[in-house]
Amino acid sequence: MMVEHPKYKTSDEVDFVIIGSGAAGGILAKELSTNGFRVVVLEQGPYLTEADYTHNEIKVLGEDLLTNHPKLQPTTFRKTPQDKAKQQRALVYGRTVGGTSVHFTANFWRFHEIDFIERSKVGAIPDANLVDWPIRYADLEPYYTKVEWEIGVSGLAGASPFDPPRSKPYPMPPLPVKSSGVIFERAARKLGWHPFPTPMAILSQPRPGRSACMNCGFCLGFGCEVGAKSSSLVAAIRVAERTGRCEIRPDSYVHHIETDARGRAVGAAYFDKDKNTHLQKAKAVIVCANGAETPRLLLMSANKQFPNGLANNSSGAVGKNLMLNSGAISLGVFDHPLNDYKGFAVSRILHDFYELDSQKVGFCGGGGLDARFDMTPIGFAMNGLPPDTPKWGSAFKKTLADNFTRTMEVFSHATSLAREDNSFSLDPELKDAWGLPALRLTYKDHPDDLKVAKWLNDRALELLDAAGAKKKWSYPIVEQEFAVHLLGTCRMGHDPKTSVINTDHRTHDVKNLFLCDGSSFVTSGRGQPTMTIEALAFRAADRITALAKSGEIGA
Amino acid sequence: MINELSRRRFLSQAGIGISAAWISAHWPEMVSAATHAHQAVQSGTAYKFEFFTPTEAAEIDALSARIIPTDEMPGAREAGVLYFIDRALVTFASGDQQMYRDGLAQLQSVVQEKFPGVEEFSAATTEQQNEILRSVDTNQKEPTIGRLQKSSQKFFEALRMATISGFLIDPEVGTGNRGGVGWKLIGREPEHSFQPPFGYYDKDYPGWQPAPASKMADKE
């Protein structure tokens, strides 16, 4: 990592300042610096690398080594705008160079055609703000392929009959199958379904500077010490830095975007590690801070010209239409050890129920199932045993001893319908450790979201039956109060009255301000958003490059 | 924290218990408690309890040994759970001190009432101990002693969580799970790199075969 990186002065007007170094910010930094632009990336978290990652569960999970800090960054939650929000931990996101792509599961499903045109297919849904995307699967297909090849995705083209068309196979074969995957595959086939090796942003073969997966088992939640997980740090930011034109500036917490008298962005104002404030000047600003922090930053940037928040005058949609993806989990216990605590999380999935017939099932949506195990020992003892297990004594001990290696989960991943009331906004009272307004989550699942979760979970239970599980049960399906997938809060669209950005990711209201991350989504997809965030980022980089080269961004 | 883990945790917290959040909130202090327990045992000298009186220590030891008993495999006692909890009550769980004191006092009155002549839980037979615990376990459908108050149930649940944490915490990190006995019990190998086959079901997997031509699932 001893490459000479540029250091820009804050008074240097660079071509682009990018806020956030995660899945989208990392790729935009790589693409724009490769295309010859001078780029500064401001990341609120520290610059941690493989040497800093650890299997120490206490540091990583207990002390939030890689994620936002609930004590420094408190949040509030309420179900509806009529309720008063209570302080509670409301979301998790990556807070380190590379963002959430450092610790994610790395399930890399493409969206399917239906995700872009669901409204046209199913019509209006009561109490939902369901609309079509202004782009189609075909617009994004080349960029999905780019993600697979440039970032590193393992998988098997053609293995699922439900896959959308693709222009190229995967660059490397799928990861090895786990016992949970074999059980899942055999049972699903018995039922006439079509399981297949899951595409994962984890290397099955080494790449320069990166090892193939060693199956350590500390995957979901942890940073990869060998660079096998395709985080934007190892797969994009290192390339950006090697151009000599991109500076990654960690520990830089942006609190507002500065605008001039003409209503144009002039740069990003941020706190450094010591809470001193700086203004990084730039010809254009690109916000990739995630579906919670991007709208928060726009709302915190309100000024006389933009009283409702930056880029929010025309639509008032900033922060609204939040989608978290619905889901459900069933567990099964088998006769022999699976030892599924070894390795990455998921090796088999199925998409037979990706697109359900809403007329037949009576709700809008669909999803996928995966086979996995992602529990650590204490968490397993608390939450992973069958609900009728005694809580103490010989029988408890025996079940614990028998089940840890013999349990697997079937996770249902599904749609969320956008509702205008579901949002991230600024809490009117609570402040963070920097004195900035705290994030307030307002969320109530659409009834169809709970129905699709239940429907898919019933299939998961059928599968566990067909697999011969000697015991099976589910976690209750309840309304969500905690956000992980942060989608839809600055949606893309043609109409400035109903959307925040256009198809170039440019805000309708501020000519040199661009947004790209989960906030750009119009629909939620079926539960695995990062692949699409990255495809959008590659596409946005092409659009923004074209605009910059034709002189349409600069003054 | 963490993507689907958090989703799963959230779902499981809502449905099954409070535990995951509790652990997450207290984890750093837990490590310190575990390290402390380890050092205390290693030193070989008489352990000086920081919170418990010797009588209380004997009671907690007996209680945790009923939660994860010792049989042909080590239990809470061999993992050093008592020392882990003692340290916890002067650090991250110090807010629970009164609950432990009250809980132990109430337990004693239950013991004496139920088995006249037996002064303490630790002096009861294993069968008597199990019977007493069944009466304080919130999860039992028919409590055998009706007048028991909620506080002793809360105490028992806290003690249960602390016992499990002291038994299964990563031995490399803290060693509350002394000698890795907790992980040995559950079959978790201590290595950090593995090669397939991982388990029973993938060892004879013949490799990916496309599905035999079959009708597409009824997308209903």
Image: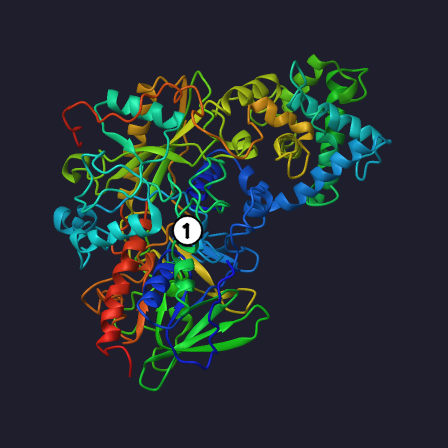
Q: Position of residue A486 (x, y in %)?
A: 37, 54
Query: Can residue A324 be seen from the camera position used here?
Result: no
Chain letter for mark 1, please.
A
Q: Position of residue B99 (x, y in %)?
A: 70, 38
Q: Give how far across and how far down residue A58 sits, in percent.
A: 60, 44
Residue on which disc 1 sits: A231
Q: How is the image coloured?
A: rainbow
In screen coordinates, is B217 left or right of A440?
left
Could you tell me which secondary element the residue under label 1 belongs to?
loop
Q: Is residue A262 left or right of residue B46?
A: left
Nearest the eye: A247 or A375: A247
* Residue at the spot 36% in from the left edge and 33% down from the top edge: A347
Up-down: is B100 above or below A193? Answer: below
A363 vs A489, left or right, is: left
- Where residue A202 sits, quadrant-wise, is top left
Residue A527, relative to residue A334: is it above or below? below
Q: Amino acid at mark 1?
A: Ser
Residue at the farthest right position: B45
Taking the image as shown, residue A401 lies to the left or right of residue A239, namely: right
The residue nearer to you, when weighing A214 against A350, is: A214
Measuring 53% from the left and 60% from the top, which residue is drawn there? A46
Task: Tell me if residue A326 comes above or below residue B198 in the rendering.
Answer: below
Q: Which is nearer the eye, A466 or A371?
A: A371
Residue A266: x and y in percent read 38, 80
Vertical placement of residue A199 versus A337, above or below: below
Q: Residue at x 84, y 36 (%)?
A: B48
> What count of labels does the image hold?
1
Within 10 Å of disc 1 (Cα), the crowding (few <14, some 14-19, many 20+) is many
| Between A239 and B95, the one nearer to me in the picture | A239
